[in-house]
Amino acid sequence: MSSTSIFQIAGSALTAQSQRMNVSASNIANASSAAGPDGRPYRARQVVFQMAPQPGSEAVGGVRVAGVIESAAPPRMQYDPGNPLADAQGYVALPNVDVVAETVNMISASRSYQANVEVINTAKTLMAKTLTLGQ
Amino acid sequence: MRGIPAAPRENGYLTRTPMIDRIGKEFEFQQTALSLRQQRQEVLASNIANADTPNYKARDIDFAASLREAMGEALRLPDTQLTLTSARHIPARAHTAGPAEELYRVPTQPSIDGNTVDMNVERVQFADNTMRYQADLALVDRRIKSLLAAMQQ
């Protein structure tokens, strides 16, 4: 363990939280993308966090994104017979994005990001004070 | 304050100056306390970083118990010593605290994903630990200054 590991721990959290925000932004942006690159409606994605233990210590560690999973929720069906993408019954399959949940997710990620920035600032102040010890 | 051990003697004469070592001893306690505060700061930072990680269990160390153990002989790493390759070398050793035991926090509001980090608790403990680290730093600083003053008399 060294005194720089706080920066690594909080830094890894910043990376992970910003990736979470990215995915959330993508979900909100594509909330009504009826056709993705493969011609099927966009599916909401979520990041999966995992603890990444520091070398030499099991209990202490940062966080990393273990993967990005696609939501298995059924697509939202909207009645719109005039749409070229509508099926025989006149329904269009829209992405399974829950915009309210994504907004909440975004706020949560941004709060966690702020908390970690605070940690880095505090660690920086402490280290600067330690360096000027005895002067 | 711990008593200063009697100077080692060989055939009735004082052996070569353990003076630097004695100054080192002056800082032993504060140094151990600071290093434990640093360890605790890391554990708390890890808790805050993993506030959204499923199944992460919040950890913490019992500072008082860890300090007691580190100052006792039982659970600590061997002292770091300088290798003396010449008779004119001054012996010195540094006191090293062993790794403190990380305990699990008892959750007050466990969440459904198995995460036991309570952000309020962690933030308060982090601020508290920061304050105490600074207090320790201030104490070491005063001690250095008083030693300096004594040397310059």
Image (cartoon, rainbow, N blue to C red):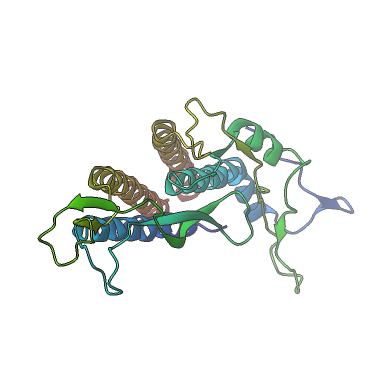
Asked if residue B149 shows in the view, the reply is: no
Outermost right residue:
B11
Which residue is at 70% across, 37% downward?
B69
Quarter holding the N terminus of chain A?
A: bottom right
Which quarter of the picture shows residue B30? top right
Outermost front residue:
A88
At which x and y percent is residue A82?
9, 60
At which x and y percent is residue A123?
39, 50
Which residue is at 39% across, 55% downward?
A71
Asked if residue B38 shows in the view, the reply is: yes
Residue placed most toward the observer, B54 or B84? B54
Which quarter of the picture shows residue B91? bottom right
Which residue is at 45% across, 40% downward?
B133
At which x and y percent is residue B110?
50, 30
Q: Is residue B13 above or below residue B86?
A: above
Outermost left residue:
A82
Which quarter of the picture shows residue B66? top right
Which residue is at 57% across, 43% downward?
B36
Q: How many marks?
A: 0
Is residue B144 shown left or right of residue A97?
A: right
Residue placed most toward the observer, A17 or A12? A17
